Amino acid sequence: MNYSDLIYIIFIILSIIFAIYLLSKVNIKEKYMETVSKANKDMLDLEKISKNIESEYKPEPIELTSYEQEQEDNAIISYEELVKNKDNGYSYDESYKSNDDEISVKKLDLDRITNQIEKPQEHIEVKLMSYDKEEAFLAALKQLQKELN
């Protein structure tokens, strides 16, 4: 075996190793593409299902007992009003952390809420008693105090 045969054998071995490496890369890429296409298909199915649910879902009406109906009729705010006003624009202080992990406590951001609400200017009219009426009232109180003692 001469020097050129040895180089030829090394070249063939390296070519085979390189071919195996390329085939493994192609196989990995095919598996990846197969996984991506399957995920896209599943995602499209999920989107279709969620849109179908959103468009066709109608909650069943709640059957109220006579007591519940009476409470609903006499309530200060009805259930429908609560549902309608659930997005009332309140903001919560996200930095607030509760010490109790079992209970979810949220702290209202009152500064933001009070700045959003425009307070109407109230005109308060104050009527003062005349001095004579005030003196008569104090005299009547003193007389009452004497009679009670």
Image: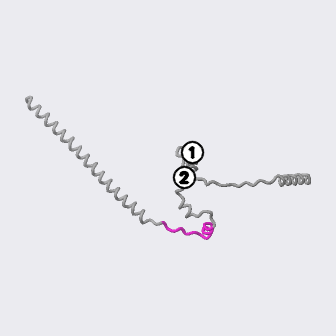
Q: Please report whichever mark, 1 or 2, sits nearer to the chain's N-terminal start.
A: 2
Range of magenta residues: 59-73
Count of labels in the image: 2
Q: Nearer the viewer, mark 1 or mark 2?
A: 2
> Can the viewer see residue 105?
no
Q: Write the residue at 52% across / 46% down.
A: 94
Q: Amino acid at mark 1?
A: Ser
Give the structural element (helix, strand or loop) at label 2: loop
Q: Position of residue 86 (x, y in %)?
A: 53, 58
Q: CA distance from mark 1 to mark 2?
A: 19 Å
Q: Position of residue 108 (x, y in %)?
A: 57, 49
Q: Nearer the viewer, residue 27 or 70?
A: 70
Three-letter amino acid code at the position of disc 2? Tyr
Q: Which residue is mark 2?
A: 90
- Percent x, y of residue 127: 75, 55
> Quick one: quadrant of the N terminus?
top left
Question: SS class of the residue under badge 1?
Answer: loop
Residue 50, label in figure: none
Question: What is the x, y in percent for residue 100?
Answer: 57, 45
Circles 1 and 2 in contact, beta carbons < 8 Å = no
Mark 1, other Cα within 10 Å: few <14 / some 14–19 / many ≥20: few
Q: Please tell me the numbered disc located at residue 98.
A: 1
| Residue found at the far top of this picture | 3
Residue at coordinates 62% horizontally, 69% vertically from top-left?
70
User: Which is nearer the eye, 108 or 140?
Assistant: 140
Q: Is residue 128 left or right of residue 97?
A: right
In this picture, residue 141 sits left or right of residue 1: right
Residue at 35% in and 59% down:
45
